Amino acid sequence: MNQTTRIIPQGLAQHEAQVAQDLEALNLPPRNWVPAISRDGVAVRDVVVIGAGMNGIAAAGALIFKGIRNIAVLEASAPGQEGPWVTTARMDTLRSPKTLPGPCFGIPSLTFRAWYVASFGAEAWEALYKIHNATWQDYLGWLQRVLRLPVEHGVRVARISPYEGVLRLTLSDGRTLLARRVVMATGRAGAGGLHMPDFVAPDLFPDLAALAPTPIDFTALRGKSLGLIGGGASAWDNAATALEQGAAEAHLYVRRATLPQINKGRGSAGPGFHQGWDSLSLQERWDLIVYMHDAQAPPPHETVKRALRLPGFQIHLATPVRAARRGDAGVVLDLGGREVRHDFLIVGTGFVVDMDRVPELADFAPHIARWEDCYTPPEALRRPEMAAFPFLGGGFELQPRDASAPAELGLIHMMNYGAHASHGGIASDIPGVAVAGERVSLAILRHLFQAEIGALRDELSAFDEPELEGTPFFVPR
C-alpha cells in the first residue's frame, strides 16, 4: 500500500459490521442445499477451487452465495502471496482504474472502494491515483477473511484424474480429494506456463537468465548490465525494478519498430464484451480474437515514464534478438549482424497456452478440444498460438475432442487465461472477474441441481410444514 496513507483505527472493524449487516439483509449465504455424496465411503466435495487469488475468490464466494457450501479452496502460496501482485508483478500500480469494484458479488460494502475508504478515509480515496499492488493484495486477503472462505494454503494440486463419475485430486502433500467439479483459477500461467523462445539457450538458466514473471534476486544484479527481451509491460517493469535496485544498465530489445499505441483491452472492458462474447458465432469470436492478438497492448504510460526516468535505461526498437547464448563472461545476444554482451538476461515474452503443458491435466490433455478442432478460419486469419486455446463450454467447462474422452472431462472448469478465446477477458483481467465468478458458479449450480433432482424432489415431497395451522381451515393429518 501507499506508505504515506494512514490506517484509520476502528474504521475497518466498523465497516465489517456493515458487511455482516448487508449479508444478513440479503440472506447470504443461504444454507447448503446440495445432497452429500461419497465414493467407497469417502466424502466428495461438491467443488474444489484451485487458486485463492482474484478469480478463486470470485468463484468460491459466488458458489457459497448460491448455497453450494461443501467446497474447498486450495492455494499453493503462503497467505498474502496469492497471485502475482506482491511477488512477480513488478509494476508500481495496477493498470486498471481505481473505480473498478472488484469481486464484490454486487454488494457495495464488498467493493474495493468501500474497503479502501473504511481503511484509509475518503480523502485518501480522492487522492489515490491508481491502486498499489500491495493494497490490492490486502483487499483480496480481506475478502478471503470477511467471506470466511475455506482456503487451505501451501497445497498444490499435482494431478486431476477421472474417478467413478467424479474427479480425484492428488495433492502435493500426498493426500487425495474427491470433487464433483473443479474450478481452475490458476491465473495467467495456468493454461500452459511461460513462453520460452527457442532462440534462447536453455543452459543460460538459472545463473545467467530468468523469465520475467518468476522470482528474481535483483540485489545480485547490482552494478550489472542487463539485457531484456520483449516490449510488453512486464519487460519494462523488470527493467525499471532492476535499475531501481542498483543495476548499472538495462537494455530492452524489441522486434517492433514502434510500440503499440492503443490498449484495445480497455476498449473491450464493459458489459457488452463481458456478457456477450460467448453469444457470438465462432467466426465472430475468432475475428475478435485475432484482432486483439494482432493489435497487442502497449506498456502503460506510467510504466514507460518510470523507466525513462532512470539512468541506464535504453530501448532498442526494430532490434529482434536472433539468438541468446552463454559467452566467456555473461550472455551474448546475436542481433543479426552484430553481437552484444550482458551480465544477465531477462526474458519477457509472456505466456503460452498449451493443454499438454498443464501438469494437473495430464490425464485429460489428449482429449481436450482446442479451437483448432472446432473452427477453421480463413488462411489470412490463422494464428497457431490462438488455435491452441481450449474450446470451452458456457460455464468454462472443458469440452471433449472426440468420443474417447473420459466422461469426467467436462467436470473441469478452466477459469484462467485459457478461457480467453472462448469467453474474452473475463477470467484474465480485473474488470471482468465478477462476471466470470457468477458465470462459473451458475453453471455448476445448474449441473448439481440437474444431477440431484431425484433427491431434491424427495426432499420436496417430505417437506411438511403446515401453513394453515391455527386457522379454521387447518386439516390435521
Image (spheres, grey):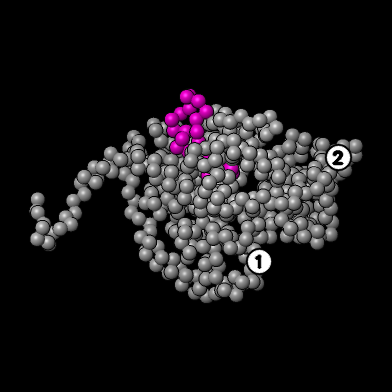
In this orientation, which residue lies closer to the viewer: 232 or 266?
Answer: 266
Q: Earlier in the sequence, mark 1 or mark 2?
A: 1
In this orientation, which residue lies closer to the viewer: 445 or 212?
Answer: 445
**SS at badge 2:** loop
> Magenta region: which residues?
398-420
Tell me if residue 30 comes above or below residue 454 in the rendering: below
Tell me if residue 265 comes above or below residue 280 in the rendering: below
- Please report the residue visible at 52 percent of the width from the left and 28 percent of the height from the top: 401
Q: x%, y% of residue 245?
A: 76, 59
Looking at numbered disc 2 in the image, what kind of residue is underneath it?
A: Leu
The tag on residue 163 is none
Which residue corresponds to mark 1? 129
In this orientation, which residue lies closer to the viewer: 381 or 313?
Answer: 381
Tell me if residue 20 comes above or below residue 254 in the rendering: below
Residues at circles 1 and 2 in contact by the CB criterion of under 8 Å: no
Which residue corresponds to mark 2? 335
- Classify residue 191 by image quadrant: top right
Q: Could you tell me if residue 203 is visible in this image? A: no
- Classify residue 310 by image quadrant: bottom right
In front: label 1 or label 2: 1
